[in-house]
Image (spheres, helix red, strand yellow):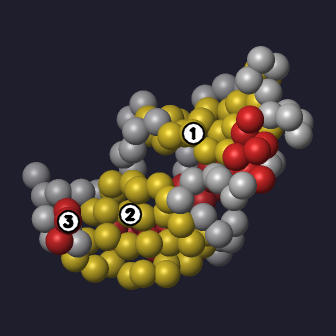
Amino acid sequence: MRLHHIAYVTADLDKKASSLCELFGFRRTGDVVVDEHQGVRILCLDMGQGHLLELLEPLGPDSPVQRHLDSGGKLYHLCFEVDRLDETLRHIEQTGDARVVRPPAEAPAFGGRKVAFVVTSDLDLVEFVEAAPE
């Protein structure tokens, strides 16, 4: 999967990290870092090819990310480019922690490449786009 760095706010950093690692095969890049100045716990996950997902958990009710979380903010969706869309979707559904809500269909915005949408058990919406032919 290929994606640029993204920050994601969660109420339970460890639970979210474990879920994402199991579901998508991400790897922790190190230990949780506490940033008192920013009022967050931080954990970066390597999504492959050097792309990172930065998970942020509020340290308390005064944390700026807590306010973001309280207002419903987390992230709308992530979009990953994958080499084998059907294989990726099969793997994700086999975990039992997600389901395809929109099966692969051609996307005019992406030159007719197929895209699919998945919803995880945490109600995260994830889009997958098949890689362009080489």
Q: Three-letter amino acid code at disc 2? A: Phe
Neighbour tally class for label 1: few under 14, some 14-19, many 20 plus, Cα within 10 Å: some
Which comes before the other along the chain, label 2 or label 1?
Answer: 1
Label 3, on which residue?
109
Q: CA distance from mark 2 to mark 1?
A: 18 Å
* Horizontal arrangement in the rendering, residue 106 relative to residue 56 (left or right): left
What residue is at 68 percent from the left and 33 percent from the top?
A: 43
**Residue 20 in the image: above or below residue 46:** below
What residue is at 49 percent from the left and 81 percent from the top?
A: 101
* Horizontal arrangement in the rendering, residue 76 relative to residue 42 (left or right): left
Neighbour tally class for label 2: few under 14, some 14-19, many 20 plus, Cα within 10 Å: many
**Near-viewer residue (39 or 24):** 39
**Residue 85 in the image: above or below residue 25:** below
Residue 35 appears in the picture as rendered: yes
Q: Three-letter amino acid code at disc 1? A: Ala
Neighbour tally class for label 3: few under 14, some 14-19, many 20 plus, Cα within 10 Å: few
Q: Report helix, strand or loop for mark 3.
A: helix
Q: Nearer the viewer, mark 2 or mark 1?
A: 1
* Horizontal arrangement in the rendering, residue 26 relative to residue 42 (left or right): left
Residue 93 appears in the picture as rendered: no
Q: Report helix, strand or loop for mark 2.
A: strand
**Near-viewer residue (71 or 29):** 71
**Near-viewer residue (110 or 63):** 63
Q: Which mark is residue 128?
A: 2
Q: CA distance from mark 3 to mark 1?
A: 25 Å
Say whether marks 2 and 3 touch (CB < 8 Å): no
Q: Three-letter amino acid code at disc 3? A: Ala
What residue is at 56 percent from the left and 72 percent from the top?
A: 119
Label 1, on which residue?
7
